[in-house]
Structure formats: structure tokens, C-alpha cells
Image (cartoon, grey):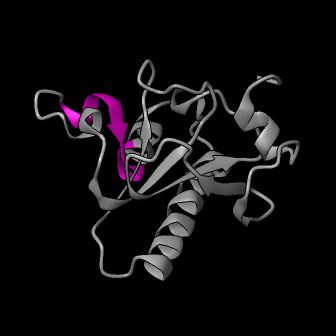
Amino acid sequence: MENCIFSKIAKGETNTKIIYEDNLIVVFNDISPAAKAHLLIIPKRPIKNMNYLKNTEEDKNLVKHMEEVGEKLLNKTNPNDEHRLGFTQPPFNTVPYLHMHVLALPLTCSFIRAPSLNPNMFFWTTDMILNRLNKSK
């Protein structure tokens, strides 16, 4: 994961414009936006993808924190727009690093809107992830 672009962004090793940063996460714009506003939130601690999250308070709090920050940022810049926040599940994620998509609708990418696909197969909300973690050992 050291050569992963998101790992480099999390470490501050790129010239990516950071929108928000704290001790747990980094937020920046998606380079290929799928909506009129499309942010990505990544943890500073490298996690390969949502399948590597564990049923620990640390991981559950991280996921909740990512959602809270995403909601706050979108409510500040796009207060009247419907929002969609979630994680892509492998193999639908293009970067092997946990990241939350924060979208202000409408979507502009047909892949995400595709009616023939079950969104639960590839786009997981925070609640879905937390429910899965709570059921795991």
C-alpha cells in the first residue's frame, strides 16, 4: 500500500489540495467526480478496503467520524442538495485503500446510477458497514 496514491495523500506526500484534515482522516476532491460535488475521505491509518475493517471501537468510530465530517462538509457547501455517502466494495473500488465517497446529488456517472445493479453490491453506507462489523467476531 506504500505506493498507493491514497497512502501518499494521507502522508502529505502529494500536492493534492486538502479540504479537511484531522488526526484520523484526510478529505479531498475526487479527480473523476461522479456528482456535482464529490469528495473522498480516507483514513490516515492505511486500511486496504472495507473488508479489512474490524469489529473494534477504533474502526467503528473511524467509520462514524468519516460520515460525520462528510455530512458537515456537504451541508456547508451544498446545504439544499440530497447527499449520498458510502464505500465501494471490492472489486468495484479502483484504489486499494479504504475511502468514503461523499456525493451531492445529482449523480453524473452512469455506473453509479445503473438501475440494473443492486447498489448494495457495490456501494455500502456507514450503517451497512457498522451492522456488518457488529455481526462479525
124 inside magenta stretch = yes
Would you say the magenta stretch is mainly helix, strand or loop? helix
Which x, y percent locates residue 70? 51, 64
Q: Nearer the viewer, residue 129 or 70?
A: 70
The residue positioned 83% from the left and 24% from the top of the image is 2
Q: Nearer the viewer, residue 86 or 38?
A: 38
Which x, y percent locates residue 9? 77, 43
Task: Quarter of the image for the N terminus: give it.
Answer: top right
Q: Nearer the viewer, residue 25 or 6?
A: 6
The residue positioned 73% from the left and 57% from the top of the image is 17
The residue positioned 63% from the left and 51% from the top of the image is 57
Which x, y percent locates residue 62? 62, 53
Residue 63 drawn above or below residue 45: below
Horizontal placement of 61 versus 117: left or right?
right
What segment carries the magenta color? 118-128
Which x, y percent locates residue 4? 74, 26
Horizontal placement of 63 versus 4: left or right?
left
The residue positioned 21% from the left and 40% from the top of the image is 113
Tell which residue pokes out farthest to the left in this image: 116
Residue 95 drawn above or below residue 135: above
Q: Tell how many labels.
A: 0
Horizontal placement of 92 versus 99: left or right?
left
Tell which residue pokes out farthest to the top in this image: 91
Question: On the image, which quarter does residue 134 sit in?
Answer: top left
Question: On the image, which quarter does residue 124 sit in?
Answer: top left
43 inside magenta stretch = no
